[in-house]
């Protein structure tokens, strides 16, 4: 596992580098990842707008900043993501804002399709669901925990919708985006803080 994590870290991006990579591909009419389609490019464009808005508006409350400042061991927060992923667009800006609050946290992002071996170590119900945050000890690269692909309440929303309608369709995705909008990143912050503190 250590060698896979080391290889992925060597291919990782800072938050700004990740954003630049996605934006550059969009200028070429492409999305990130191995698969290319109009839908994935469209989702990537939507996500760019969402992430730009969240970068400006996302707030880490004072009590969460305090908890982040109290982290006493150095960590790498390694996130597996893709530009077309709606959950990643909602969660990555939050993770970035949290990481900015502590000198002990080094945020790194990798693309799922370029890091299949890493993704296979962190499957959700045997699926390659993203985003996936892997919390690592910076010195040993020991995995301290992981979070994702979405907060518990958002997971339940999708499970309930699928149980009722038998499918996750555009309506479900819209409901999920509304949930994120109302939650303002607080569930994600709470779950990640419980993982790292």
Image (spheres, grey):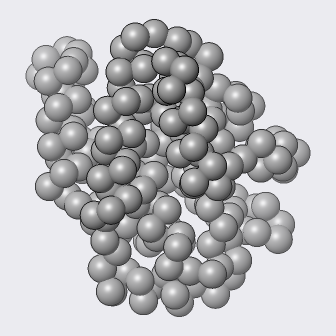
Q: Residue at x 52, y 12 (%)?
A: 36
In the depicted structure, whether residue 50 falls above or below residue 76: above
Q: Residue at x 53, y 70 (%)?
A: 99
Q: Residue at x 20, y 20 (%)?
A: 170
Q: Is residue 3 left or right of residue 47?
A: right
State which quadrant residue 160 falls in. Answer: top left
Residue 101 appears in view? yes
Q: Nearer the viewer, residue 68 or 121?
A: 68
State which quadrant residue 187 falls in. Answer: bottom left
State which quadrant residue 89 falls in. Answer: top left
Residue 128 appears in view? no
In the depicted structure, whether residue 49 falls above or below residue 135: above
Q: Residue at x 15, y 43 (%)?
A: 178
For the N terminus, the quadrant is top right
Q: Position of residue 194 (x, y in %)?
A: 43, 71
Q: Is residue 115 left or right of residue 164?
A: right
Q: Nearer the viewer, residue 179 or 128?
A: 179
Q: Specify the farthest residue to the front.
A: 27
Q: Position of residue 63 (x, y in %)?
A: 33, 86
Q: Specify the farthest residue to the top.
A: 37
Q: Is residue 173 left or right of residue 36?
A: left
Q: Nearer the viewer, residue 121 or 56?
A: 56
Give the mark count. 0
In the depicted structure, whether residue 106 falls above or below residue 124: below
Q: Position of residue 151 (x, y in %)?
A: 34, 51
């Amino acid at each position: 596992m250590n060698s896979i994590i080391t290889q992925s870290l060597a291919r990782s991006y800072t938050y700004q580098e990740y954003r630049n990579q996605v934006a550059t591909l969009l200028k070429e009419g492409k999305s990130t990842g191995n698969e290319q389609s109009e839908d994935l490019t469209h989702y990537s464009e939507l996500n760019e707008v969402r992430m730009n808005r969240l970068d400006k508006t996302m707030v880490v409350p004072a009590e969460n900043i305090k908890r982040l400042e109290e982290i006493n061991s150095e960590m790498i927060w390694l996130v597996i993501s893709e530009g077309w992923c709606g959950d990643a667009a909602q969660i990555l800006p939050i993770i970035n804002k949290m990481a900015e609050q502590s000198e002990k946290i080094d945020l790194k992002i990798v693309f799922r399709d370029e890091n299949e071996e890493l993704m296979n170590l962190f499957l959700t119900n045997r699926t390659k669901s993203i985003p996936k945050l892997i919390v690592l000890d910076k010195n040993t690269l020991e995995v301290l925990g992981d979070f994702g692909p979405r907060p518990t309440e958002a997971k339940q929303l999708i499970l309930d919708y699928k149980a009722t309608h038998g499918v996750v369709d555009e309506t479900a995705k819209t409901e999920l985006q509304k949930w994120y909008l109302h939650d303002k990143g607080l569930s994600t912050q709470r779950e990640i803080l419980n993982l790292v503190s």
